[in-house]
């Protein structure tokens, strides 16, 4: 089916580095926009070219600060008010995804609130990768294209030629994801069980499964403070693993994460570029794979009303 609506790409300030790669892979260029920042910190994005009747893709990850999310919403509202035919939010990293349920009294369900706000701002479709919880797709009343970084990680892992491999989940919550990788790669599976003292602080941890003489690959959707990840890596080495690598889609890497990774038994941490690494930190153990080609391919298929089911590996 031929699409009669011109496609245009725009980006928020925090994700320009990735948006440029996605748009280049698609074979296009970024549209012109700018952000006016007022003396009190308030800001106003605006488009410097017409989007009337266009299918507008706005590329922006919503990692902290909250201005990144708000900038995306303002850009969506601006596109809608400028008579865009359709507004698609491309959110490589969907922030607030850990707030997916009421796990204690009197707390918000942040992921649902963000879904509501995006729709209210004029977003008609969301494209994202490796949500912290799959059920977040159900929080939206608009189509969600939920991509998986496994389409990037699996070929990379196979290319490393690692023998005697085992896939590990850093906690019980990641067992489903690790099991999918384990089945696809044909490896044994290990699960780490942890007791969390409080948010971002891990207490005791133990490993369930055969670790001895294995080259362990720890699989997770994001690495934040790296407390769980590095503790799991050190535990694997204590249990007799040959080596420990980790793959994590979203390198949030807050607090002392960079220092923990550098000082840990991890041989390598493989991440994607949904969130940029900090230039002032030690990243010698971190390998970055780009999601640009994956998003560009899916954007092309969505724009041309083609199936994207072939893009899902795990």
Image (cartoon, rainbow, N blue to C red):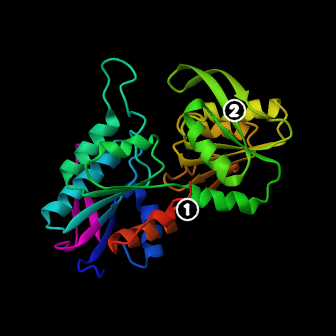
Question: Which residue lies at the image location 18% right of the left edge and 48% below the top edge?
Answer: 120
Q: Secondary structure at mark 1?
A: loop
Q: Mark 2 or 1 closer to N-term? A: 2
Question: Which image quarter holds the N terminus?
Answer: bottom left
Question: Which residue lies at the image location 39% right of the left edge and 78% below the top edge?
Answer: 28
User: Spatial distance from mark 2 to mark 1, Cα to Cα?
Assistant: 26 Å
Q: Is residue 298 left or right of residue 261?
A: left
Q: Position of residue 163 (x, y in %)?
A: 82, 53
Closest to the observer: 308 or 81? 308
Q: Is residue 219 left or right of residue 266?
A: left
Q: Which residues are magenta?
A: 32-56
Q: Is residue 39 magenta?
A: yes
Check disc 2 and report the residue beneath it: 232
Disc 2 packing (10 Å; few <14; some 14–19; many ≥20): many
Q: Position of residue 109 (x, y in %)?
A: 32, 31
Asked if disc 2 and disc 1 are in contact, CB closer than 8 Å, the reply is: no
- Residue 41 in sight in this render: no
Q: Is residue 197 magenta?
A: no
Relative height, residue 248 to residue 158 (above, below): above
Q: Which mark is residue 290?
A: 1
Q: Position of residue 115 (x, y in %)?
A: 29, 44
């Amino acid at each position: 089916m031929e699409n009669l609506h011109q496609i245009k790409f725009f980006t928020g300030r925090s994700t320009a580095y990735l948006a440029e790669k996605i748009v280049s892979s698609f074979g296009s260029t970024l549209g012109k926009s700018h952000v006016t920042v007022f003396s009190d910190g308030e800001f106003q994005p605006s488009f410097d070219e017409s989007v009337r009747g266009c299918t507008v893709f706005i590329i922006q990850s919503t990692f902290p600060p909250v201005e990144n999310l708000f900038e995306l919403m303002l850009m969506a509202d601006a596109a809608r008010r400028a008579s865009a035919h359709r507004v698609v939010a491309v959110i490589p990293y969907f922030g607030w995804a850990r707030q997916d349920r009421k796990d204690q009294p009197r707390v918000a369900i942040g992921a649902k609130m963000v879904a509501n706000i995006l729709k209210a701002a004029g977003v008609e479709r969301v494209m994202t990768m490796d949500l912290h919880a799959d059920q977040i797709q159900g929080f939206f009343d608009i189509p969600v294209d939920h991509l998986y970084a496994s389409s990037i990680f699996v070929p990379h892992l196979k290319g490393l030629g690692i023998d005697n491999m085992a896939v590990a989940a850093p906690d019980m919550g990641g067992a489903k994801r690790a099991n999918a990788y384990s089945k696809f790669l044909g490896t044994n599976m290990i699960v780490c069980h942890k007791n969390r003292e409080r948010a971002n602080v891990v207490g005791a941890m133990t490993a369930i499964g055969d670790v001895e003489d294995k080259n362990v690959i720890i699989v997770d959707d994001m690495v934040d403070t790296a407390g769980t990840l590095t503790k799991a890596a050190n535990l694997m080495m204590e249990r007799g693993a040959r080596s420990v690598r980790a793959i994590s889609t979203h390198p949030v890497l807050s607090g002392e994460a960079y220092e923990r990774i550098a000082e840990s038994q991890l041989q390598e941490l493989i991440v994607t570029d949904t969130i940029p690494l900090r230039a002032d930190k030690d990243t010698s153990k971190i390998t970055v794979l780009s999601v640009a080609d994956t998003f560009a391919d899916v954007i092309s298929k969505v724009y041309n009303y083609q199936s994207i089911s072939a893009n899902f590996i795990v």
